[in-house]
Amino acid sequence: MNPQSTLPPTPAALPPKTGDPSAPGGSGHEGPRSEVKLFAGLGHVALAVWAVIVIVPILWTFLAAFKNTSEIFSSPWTLPAELRWENFGRAWTKAHVGRYFLNSVIVVSCSTFLTMLLGSMAAYVLARYKFWGNRAVYFLFVSGLAFPVFLALVPLFFVVKNLGLLDTHTGVVLVYTAYSLPFTVFFLAAFFKTLPSSVAEAGMIDGCGHSRLFFQVMMPMAKPGLISVAIFNIIGQWAQYQLPLVLLSNAKDKWVLTQGIADISVNAGYEADWSGLFAALTIAILPMILVYAVFQRQIQAGLTSGAVK
Amino acid sequence: MRHGKYPFVIGFLFAPVALYVTFVIWPYAQAFQISMTNWRGLSAPQWVGFDNYRRLLDDGAFWKAVQHHGVLLLALPLITIAIALFFAFLLNVGGKSSGGQRQGVWGAKFYRVVFFFPQVLAVAIIAVLFQMVYRPNESGLINGVLMKLGIEPILFLVKPNLALWSIIAVLVWQAVGFYVVLFSAGMASIPGEIYEAAEMDGATKVTLFFRVTLPLLWDTLQVAWVYLGIAAFDAFAIVAVLSVDGGGPDGATTVLAMEIYRNAFVYSKYGYASAMGVALFFLTLTFAALTLRLTKRESVEY
């Protein structure tokens, strides 16, 4: 499937050739230097192949978004004959991608904000205050890391239904927040523990209340940790598919982007509007590229933070 | 200790705990109870004991799904970690060394940025994207080329024995970049002197990789395996969107989350769906316990 993963370890098998004298650096050995070149050469091919495998499907989608259906079928690999912006117009209004996009933005910004607020409050108290039941509450939160969401899908549906929150954004926001709390609390509690207590004590002496201390002293100090978790939550909640599918099934005007795009892809089959689907996909992917281009360092750090810890 | 501590602690904990118990803990607790009933949503649930679990044992779709989790559990981590390790090694250690400073190959930064990008996209979006890539006629990205060359189109998602692997390929496509970055972080913390010493002794890159990088990266590999294992137990979004009629053709790609969703929200068999959920819970738990046991090994201090 992936040829580069099965590349034979040629560099070791080949007898060392005479090193290229123009190669800079090196540790003095003749052998290793040519071996480095060969290894790097093969490596470059593999890396380039994978880069192509990642980039081409996305680029191909962007190009197809400007084509019409007959072009998509007759010449899938050429540039579009003309830039058909109307495909995007059709996707944005007729297929409601605009609506779905806006819904996703609303839901994810609300739920991430709520997750960060509640998560940091709980994490702070659990990390820095001694009280009866502290460990129990902490483990209650952390145990949530081990369970998959769909184990409780049926009861969750009825809990939300009985609260009258089915087919509402409020319900989705609350559920997203609840399911994001375990990781958020786990990560932030560890982070708050590392903050020096001298600053907090100084604040206390100056007559700072507990809440003011938290919002005005500790929160700003915890900013790097908060940003990492916020990115982690934004990307995770933006990608949610199963929860909105279950919780918003009967309210099409409230659907989020993932749901909407999946639905458009089903309908594109019936209506044969492939260019509209490609345009919808482009609208869904392009903003992520822009955001990623600007924040890629923070995003990489944020997403891997849970694993590196 | 300090005055006013308890009102503050309770005030700060109340909302998060209430929300968490309502939407996470309470549903989990109920799942076990519902799984012992024949509840279908309309009349009051009747207690049926372990009937649902007995029926699970004879359910072909359930066993197919379990089997697919087995395949995913082996293939997804193995393929992803192998590719990601290879790339991470190239990007961090693959280049020339100058003055003891390990260097990656030229363009390492660019590759890392590109490889990681799919991680930012939602799985459902990627699934739709690959629906187009895999299309069985000349409008598909792959078959468009094949048919131009006069080769028979490959029915990626329709052929039962190819469909699951087509889906695994997409999961690998998305995951590799994340693990390249993860392993890169691990490799960066391995001191350069170790490599230098090994190279002095005439170690080749391949020896370096197997004798130095791999053992020192063991902890990170373990984390990667657990993460990918968790992903292998989910796979709902990709199967629901990418496969032919949700887990098809004829159940060839179905996973437990798909069967739970179908039984609950299509057939309204809430009791039965919950029993599947509980079964899945124990599968996940077994996996976690096994991983911890099997990978337990002295980590190398450095």
Image (cartoon, rainbow, N blue to C red):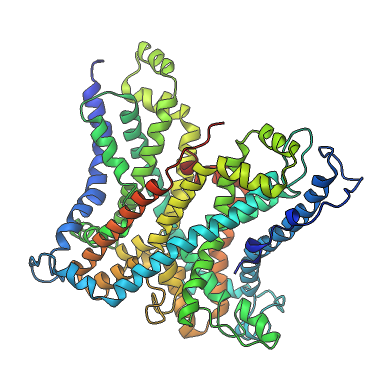
What is the count of numbered marks? 0
Q: Is there any visible trace of residue B82 in the rendered image?
A: yes
Q: Residue at (25%, 26%) from the top-left corner?
A: B8
Q: Quadrant of the N terminus of chain A?
A: bottom right
Q: Which is more toward the observer, B45 or A66?
A: B45
Q: Where residue A155 sits: x, y (%)?
A: 21, 59
Q: Which is more toward the observer, B181 or B95?
A: B95
Q: Residue at (43%, 47%) from the top-left corner?
A: B295
- Relative to A229, say whether A210 is above or below: above
Q: Is there any visible trace of residue A44 in the rendered image?
A: no
- Relative to A247, say whether A84 is above or below: below
| A239 left or right, relative to B3 | right
Q: Which is more toward the observer, B64 or B19?
A: B64
Q: Residue at (82%, 46%) from the top-left corner?
A: A31
Q: Residue at (42%, 15%) from the top-left corner?
A: A198
| B21 left or right, relative to B154 | left
Q: Where residue A55 sits: x, y (%)?
A: 65, 63
Q: Where residue A301 sits: x, y (%)?
A: 54, 42
- Relative to B227, say whether B155 is above or below: below
| B280 left or right, relative to A11 | left
- Relative to B208, say whether B79 is above or below: below
